[in-house]
Image (spheres, helix red, strand yellow):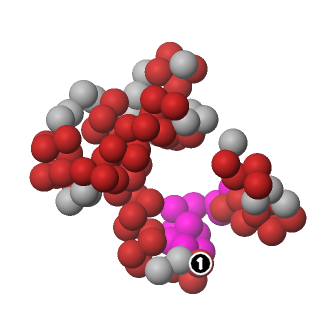
Amino acid sequence: MQLDKLRGKELDQLFTAIMKMDSLEDCYTLFEDLATVNEIQALAQRLEVARQLREGNTYHKIEKATGASTATISRVKRCLNYGSGGYDLALARLGLVEEEVADN
């Protein structure tokens, strides 16, 4: 895992803080202070690209719907195919993909 290189007290603190948020509004409040608008938009866009790729949409359709570049779509697809499964886990927890997709 690429994040293993960064694993430590500070990253644990960040992820724990995110998990401790009690509501969507709490998350908005934290992320407003934590990241720039562009960073937040980029993260949200990547998750949406992953959802659309799992639905079988074409690069063209995804690019048109999300505004993501083909490079971003390609990177997300590479993560879906060869990554650690984080996108599928998140999409499954959101009820946006079948559980068995996340288990692969």
In the foreground, 81 or 33: 81
* Residue 11 shown in magenta: no
Number of numbered discs on residues:
1
Residue name at image x 76 percent, y 49 percent:
4
Q: Going by the image, does 19 lie left or right of 89?
A: right
Residue extent of the magenta highlight: 19-31
Name the spot of residue 2 as percent of width and height, x first.
Answer: 67, 48
Q: Quadrant of residue 34?
A: bottom right
In the foreground, 48 or 72: 72
In the foreground, 57 or 16: 57
Q: Going by the image, does 26 lie left or right of 79?
A: right
Q: Going by the image, does 93 lie left or right of 6?
A: left
Residue 29 seen in the figure: no
Residue name at image x 44 percent, y 60 percent:
43
Q: Mark 1 — residue?
A: 34
Name the spot of residue 30 as percent of width and height, x first.
Answer: 59, 75
